[in-house]
Every structure is written in structure tokens, then in C-alpha cells.
């Protein structure tokens, strides 16, 4: 039987009794408390009560770091902004075009840009929009971002789910809805990332509506910053119909490079350029006898260093 409770709840005295027994390894009589002592003990026991009985779910109070949107984006601005310049177009009419290396690289780069954007514009838009949304912890102990985003002349309702794993990784799922396209919480993206989203992978699904989901693209990334990253993209469908099967994009400061290969893993084009100096080069078995072709900061053909 407990000593006189002195106005304290029996449950709290149970913890006091347990606490004293733990500290002294023997039961000591509880002395008579003054009002101030009672309040002090009550506060201390409440802390103990909270610490001993908190039902921790193992989920951190802060949401996981979102995967970077830049790994789903393209940046061929050097080519889109300069291939129609007056000097370049004038040179194109000459028998020996002094801008031929840049123009050939530009044609290939813009085709790659169109291919990537056609498949990744919506996923990239979703990750960009998620950065401005405050997530909530749902009843399944998953972090959830809910918002709407526009893409391809449509508006999609989006639910992005991040579930932290014991391994430190986070698994991701992106569901989209659009009544006009018969999409009702269809799985557009699924993937995994490290704790700081410094590396990870995405599977991009082709949405046919009515619950039909087909894996379409596989994308793996390593990310340090918006100017230091690498991305490997591979098409999973229509392999025999696509001239390009895989695309590797990497950036190291101002230096960018895009390498595309066909279904036999043979090189289609290796395009490198500097976003600051605008110099660059192209290697393709279909151009310049497969030798590296370079251009200078004015986009004119030049000897490769």
C-alpha cells in the first residue's frame, strides 16, 4: 500500500514509487510534502511520465529531403538560344559552313531536349511545385505533399508520399489524378533516395488511364548541387523504335555533357559545352568521320585542343 497520497493522483505516486525504488534499490517512505514540494514533484513526475510512456513511432519530426527536381530537367539553352543567330544562319548557306560543328551539335541537342521534356516535364514540374508545399504526417506515418500542378495543357491533382525507412533511405510515390484523362490516383513516379537525397532513382510510369500503369523510364542520379550532378536515363519501352535508348547528363561547374546511346549501347552523340565560355564539342560516328568537332566562343568551327 502506498503512503498517504497528499493530494497527488495515485497514478503519479505509482511512478514516484517506481522512481524511488529504481534510484535507491529499496522502498523509502514518502515524506510529507509542502504545497511547493508537491508541485515540484508533480512537475518532475510528469516529465518522467511523458518520457517513459511516449509512444514513439520512429518517424522524425522533420520531413525527408525531397529529391532534386533538376535531375528531371533539361538545360540546352546554349543551343536553343543561339542556333538561329544571324551569323550562324548566314554561314549555313555557304559551301563550307564555318558554324557546322555547332549546328550539328545543336540539332542533336534539341532533339534530345524534346525527347526528355516529352517524358519528364510533368514529373519535373511536380517536384518543383512540391518544394513550396508544407507536408503533413498522415495516419500511416508517411509524409504527404498534396497540391495541384499544370502540365501538358492539363491540371493534375498530386499526392507525393515519402516514407522513411530504417535503413535511412526514403521511398517515394507520386500519385496523380485528372478526370478528363481518366486518372484517379494513378502511380506516375516511384523511387528511392538516400537520407539527404544525394543519390537515388526514379521509375517513371506511362499512364494509360483506368488504372493501367506501365514502367516507361528508369532514372538514376547522384546530386551534390545544381551545378554538380549526374543523371542516367534509360527507356524501358519501345526499345526497338527509339533511335536513342539511354541518355547520360552530367554537370561539373560550368562544364556540361550529354551522351546518348542506341539499344546496342553504341554511341550516338557525345556533346560537351561550357555554359560560361559557350565553347564546346561533338563526337558522333555519323559526323566528321567520328572525330571530335569543336567550336569556339563565337560558335565558329575551331581546332580541338
Image: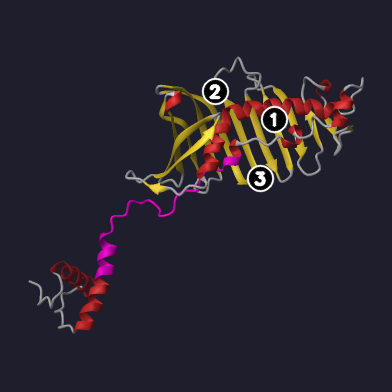
Q: Residue at x 49, y 33 (%)?
A: 155
Q: Main secondary structure of the magenta part?
A: loop
- Judging depth in this view, the residue of 26 and 41 nearest the camera is 41
- Judging depth in this view, the residue of 240 and 266 nearest the camera is 240
Q: Earlier in the sequence, mark 2 or mark 1?
A: 2
What residue sits right under mark 1 in the picture?
259
Q: Does 298 appear above or below 286?
A: below
Say which quarter of the image contains residue 279.
Answer: top right
Q: Does 283 appear above or below 201?
A: above
Q: Which residues are magenta?
A: 46-70
| Residue 41 located left or right of residue 188 | left
**Regarding mark 3 in the picture, which secondary structure is present there?**
strand
Q: Position of residue 44 (x, y in %)?
A: 27, 73
Q: Residue at x 57, y 28 (%)?
A: 119
Q: Which label belongs to residue 111? A: none
In the image as oriented, which residue stretches furthest toward the left?
Answer: 1
Q: Residue at x 16, y 78 (%)?
A: 28
Say which quarter of the image contains residue 23.
Answer: bottom left
What residue sits right under mark 3 in the picture?
228
Residue 77 visible in the snapshot: yes
Reply yes or no: does residue 164 show up in magenta: no
Amino acid at each position: 500500500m502506498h503512503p498517504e497520497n497528499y493530494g497527488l493522483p495515485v497514478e503519479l505516486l505509482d511512478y514516484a514509487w517506481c522512481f524511488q525504488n529504481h534510484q535507491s534499490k529499496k522502498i523509502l517512505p514518502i515524506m510529507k510534502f509542502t504545497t511547493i514540494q508537491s508541485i515540484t514533484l508533480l512537475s518532475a513526475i510528469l516529465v518522467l511520465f511523458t518520457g517513459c510512456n511516449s509512444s514513439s513511432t520512429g518517424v522524425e519530426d522533420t520531413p525527408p529531403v525531397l529529391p532534386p527536381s533538376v535531375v528531371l530537367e533539361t538545360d540546352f539553352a546554349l543551343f536553343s538560344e543561339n542556333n538561329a543567330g544571324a551569323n550562324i544562319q548566314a554561314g549555313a548557306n555557304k559551301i563550307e559552313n564555318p558554324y557546322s560543328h555547332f549546328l550539328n551539335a545543336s540539332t542533336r541537342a534539341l532533339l534530345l531536349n524534346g525527347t526528355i521534356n516529352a517524358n519528364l516535364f510533368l514529373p519535373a514540374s511536380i517536384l518543383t511545385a512540391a518544394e513550396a508545399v508544407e507536408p503533413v504526417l498522415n495516419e500511416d506515418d508517411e509524409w504527404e505533399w498534396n497540391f495541384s500542378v499544370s502540365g501538358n495543357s492539363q491540371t493534375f491533382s498530386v499526392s507525393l508520399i515519402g516514407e522513411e525507412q530504417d535503413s535511412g533511405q526514403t521511398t517515394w510515390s507520386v500519385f496523380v489524378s485528372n478526370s478528363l484523362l481518366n486518372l484517379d490516383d494513378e502511380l506516375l513516379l516511384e523511387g528511392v533516395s538516400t537520407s539527404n537525397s544525394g543519390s537515388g532513382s526514379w521509375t517513371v510510369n506511362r499512364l494509360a488511364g483506368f488504372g493501367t500503369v506501365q514502367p516507361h523510364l528508369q532514372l538514376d542520379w547522384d546530386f551534390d548541387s545544381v551545378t554538380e550532378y549526374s543523371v542516367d536515363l534509360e527507356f524501358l519501352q519501345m526499345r526497338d523504335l527509339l533511335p536513342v535508348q539511354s541518355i547520360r547528363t552530367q554537370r561539373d561547374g560550368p562544364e556540361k555533357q550529354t551522351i546518348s546511346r542506341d539499344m546496342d549501347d553504341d554511341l550516338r552523340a557525345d556533346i560537351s559545352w561550357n555554359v560560361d565560355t559557350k565553347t564546346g564539342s561533338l563526337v558522333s560516328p555519323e559526323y566528321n568521320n567520328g572525330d571530335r568537332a569543336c567550336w569556339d566562343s563565337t560558335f565558329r568551327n575551331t581546332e580541338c585542343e
